[in-house]
Amino acid sequence: MRIAHTALWTHDLDAAASFWETYFGATVGEPYRSQRRPGFVSRFISLPESNAQIELMTGPWLPCDPQSERIGWDHIAISLGSKAAVDALAERCKTDNCLKSTPRTTGDGFYEAVITMPEGTPVEITI
């Protein structure tokens, strides 16, 4: 078994797509507009050297406070392959004001930093 894709709601589809393109070199697919659900638009992104995809989705019915916690997925962790890669991307995100927590070794032994998408969704970057 493998995860085919995960999905993420966003108010700003273009900003979310740009985030994944800018910081992870993702390939962004063309927008899909649903005929059955008016206002629903999504785009798939593909990460380099991976079969994993993320579906970015938007719709006019989304709640106004994207920062509020709710039941469901909290974050995604992206393995960059090395401590140096984590440090370099964390430094780049610090400059761009999207670094939430600096690189560290967690209590359960993961080396990680946390960056945020434009609307605040956390993305862990790990070895």
Image: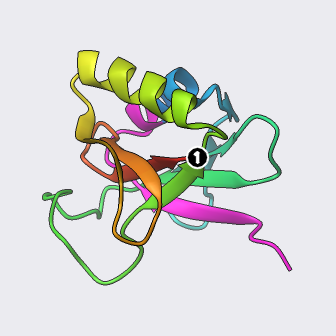
Q: Residue furthest right?
A: 1
Neighbourhood count class around disc 1 (C-alpha, 10 Å): few under 14, some 14–19, many 20 upward: some
Q: Is residue 38 visible?
A: no
Give percent across and percent down for residue 61.
29, 64
What segment is highlighted magenta in the picture?
1-16
- Residue at 70%, 35% (x, y): give it: 29
Horizontal relation, residue 45 to residue 99: left or right: right
- Residue at 45%, 51% (x, y): give it: 111
- Residue at 26%, 24% (x, y): give it: 94
State the residue position of label 1. Answer: 127
Residue 25 or 10: which is nearer the viewer? Answer: 25
Give percent across and percent down for residue 110.
47, 60
Q: Is residue 118 visible?
A: yes
Q: Quadrant of residue 97?
A: top left
Image position of 65 with respect to 20: above or below: below
Image position of 73 with respect to 126: above or below: below
Give percent across and percent down for residue 51.
83, 51
Q: State yes or no: residue 6 in magenta.
A: yes
Q: Residue furthest bottom?
A: 71
Image position of 66 with respect to 19: above or below: below
Residue 43 or 79: which is nearer the viewer? Answer: 79
Residue 45 or 24: which is nearer the viewer? Answer: 24
Q: Quadrant of residue 5?
A: bottom right
Q: Amino acid at mark 1?
A: Ile
Q: Which quarter of the rendering shows the N terminus?
A: bottom right
Q: State yes or no: residue 37 in magenta.
A: no
Give the number of marks.
Answer: 1
- Residue at 60%, 67% (x, y): give it: 36
Element type where label 1 sits in the image:
loop
